[in-house]
Amino acid sequence: MSITAEAAWARLNALAKPPGSLGRLESLAARLAVIQQSLRPVTRPRRLVLFAGDHGVAASGVTAWPSSVTGAMIGLICAGRASSSALARAQDADLRLVDVGSLSGTADPPAFFRDARIAPGTADLSGGAAMTPANFDAAWTIGEEEARFAHAGGFKVLIAGEMGIGNTTPAACLTMLLTGAELATGRGAGADDDMLARKTAIVEAAVAGARSLDPKTGIAAVCGFEIAAMAGFFAQAAQQGSTILLDGYVTTAAALIAEHLCPGTAARMIAAHLSAEPGHRAALDALGLEPLLEWNMRLGEGTGALTALPLLDSAAALMSDVALLSEVTP
């Protein structure tokens, strides 16, 4: 039997509580039930797959941080001392790290690290295409493989996170390209006014160039290895019936690609939060998603989604564990 939104709401309204008394938690529970096609949805086990990649555009003055920080953060994640590592432990989420295209990894990688590097970072999109269509396909395939691997491992909720200095620049390009939004460029990880002006000009010029290309070539021209991998991850996760908890601005740019190339992917998604980046609302609106949290988070690494995980747990518990009103009334 197909679980429709009406069927989910019928169960929620039949529980031993006043209808609608748990507000948006009930809306989340209904969406979770429809996504999983079950009136008793589950949220465990869950996995965060963190995709890492460097961006050539970082050298054009769009970020306050050097690209070397990507490799340093890969090491910190591997050591279990990054924000994503701490939050994954706190939320009992499995963490897997995939290096899709960074300049450096870690000398002694743990079991959850996968080196799948296509190249040492993308080209500078301010001077031409960041990626070729072949690069894009290779990264997409890496993401697909990770989604299949997670599904084979029995993981019910999948999160994609990213690590890549400069990646809010391609995210802004993709948001403008795929939604038509005019204001999509923000400060990322702390750009000052001069950097923001430079970043905005680069994004506008790159998007103008991408619009003159065929859709897939245009996407590749302003994309990143880790973003393309997340897009493939999302598309495959949706196809196999996984529940996708969407993180912030960069992951939502990847979600836009997945929905554009594989329509219907967004139907399997729950948006964890609204980023501080100005283009994030337009990207979520284009996907038809309403964020659970609005806490001005902008770190990435899947941290916003990890923070929202307890809300999914509460929604699943509501659907699965609360008695029906008919059981407690004469």
Image (spheres, helix red, strand yellow):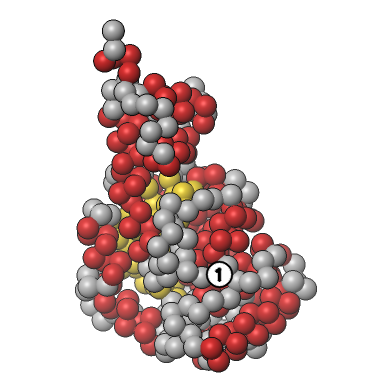
Location of residue 27 by image quarter: top left
Label 1: which residue?
278
Q: Nearer the viewer, residue 148 or 124?
A: 124
Q: Amino acid at mark 1?
A: Pro
Q: Is residue 228 above or below residue 25?
A: below
Residue drawn at x 70%, y 65% as measured from the top left: 180
Residue drawn at x 41%, y 56% as measured from the top left: 293
Locate residue 145, reporting x and y percent: 44, 57
Residue 215 appears anywhere in the view: yes
Q: Nearer the viewer, residue 299 or 222?
A: 299
Locate residue 5, reporting x and y percent: 51, 31
Residue 32 appears anywhere in the view: no
Q: Nearer the viewer, residue 15 or 242?
A: 15
Determine the residue located farthest toward the top in the rendered image: 330
Locate residue 298, reporting x and y percent: 42, 70
Q: Secondary structure at mark 1?
A: loop
Residue drawn at x 31%, y 23% as measured from the top left: 16
Q: Is residue 76 above or below residue 138?
A: below
- Position of 210 with respect to 1 (left or right) is right
Q: Is residue 164 above or below residue 7?
A: below
